[in-house]
Amino acid sequence: MPPIISLQVSNDLLERFEKVRKLSGFTSKSEALRDSIFSFIEKNEKYENLENDILIMTVSLVYPFKELIIDQITELYSRFHQIIKTITDWRIAEKKIELLLLIGEFYTIKDLYKELAKIKDVICSIREIIID
């Protein structure tokens, strides 16, 4: 018998998960979670041997235009200035959208991304740019 994983989440996260699960056509929570685990592995596994490689990546952020959040992000930008090549930003209503172009060692880019993702109310994604 395969192992069973126990998971605790907030009511809000469970409600959002259930809504998306049903819209996506998954018939059970387990089926949707297995798919999510597979997607997580595929997304992250490709980077496991890149620790010392120099990469070009983009990070996009969306967050509420609040001074506390901006201060936290600005502090991170200062700490990681050596890999940040450009930042493009837009303000739409009460949201700020930023696109960062990063060039550096993967572990440094990953550290910046993880720190940004920890900030409350910040939604971020990361993409590798492939140049052949």
Image: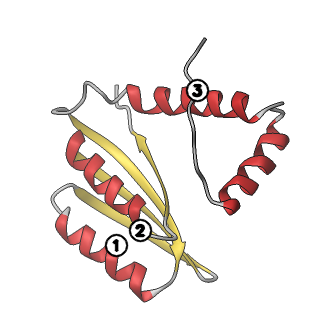
What residue did someone put label 2 on?
Answer: 119
Residue type indicated by callout 1: Ile
Residue type indicated by callout 2: Ile
Distance between mark 2 and mark 3 Cα atoms: 31 Å
Q: Is residue 91 shown above or below 85?
A: below
Q: How is the image coloured?
A: secondary structure
Say whether residue 54 is visible. Answer: yes
Instruction: Evaluate if marks 3 and 1 touch, with contact meaning CB atoms under 8 Å apart.
Output: no
* Direction bottom: furthest residue: 67
Task: Please provide percent x and percent y for residue 29.
Answer: 74, 36
Label at residue 73: 1
Q: Tag 1: Cα neighbours inside 10 Å, few (<14), some, or many (≥20)? A: some
Q: Is residue 113 left or right of residue 31?
A: left
- At a point 30% along the width and 42% down the height, the residue shown is 56
Distance between mark 1 and mark 2 Cα atoms: 8 Å
Discs 1/2, front: 2
- Element under label 3? loop
Discs 3/1, front: 3
Depth order, front residue of 56/13: 13
What residue did someone put label 3 on?
Answer: 4
Task: Please provide percent x and percent y for residue 55.
Answer: 26, 38
The quarter of the rendered structure image containing the C terminus is top left
- Element under label 1? helix
**Looking at the rendering, which quadrant does residue 119 occupy?**
bottom left
- Element under label 2? loop
Instruction: Evaluate if marks 2 and 3 touch, with contact meaning CB atoms under 8 Å apart.
Output: no
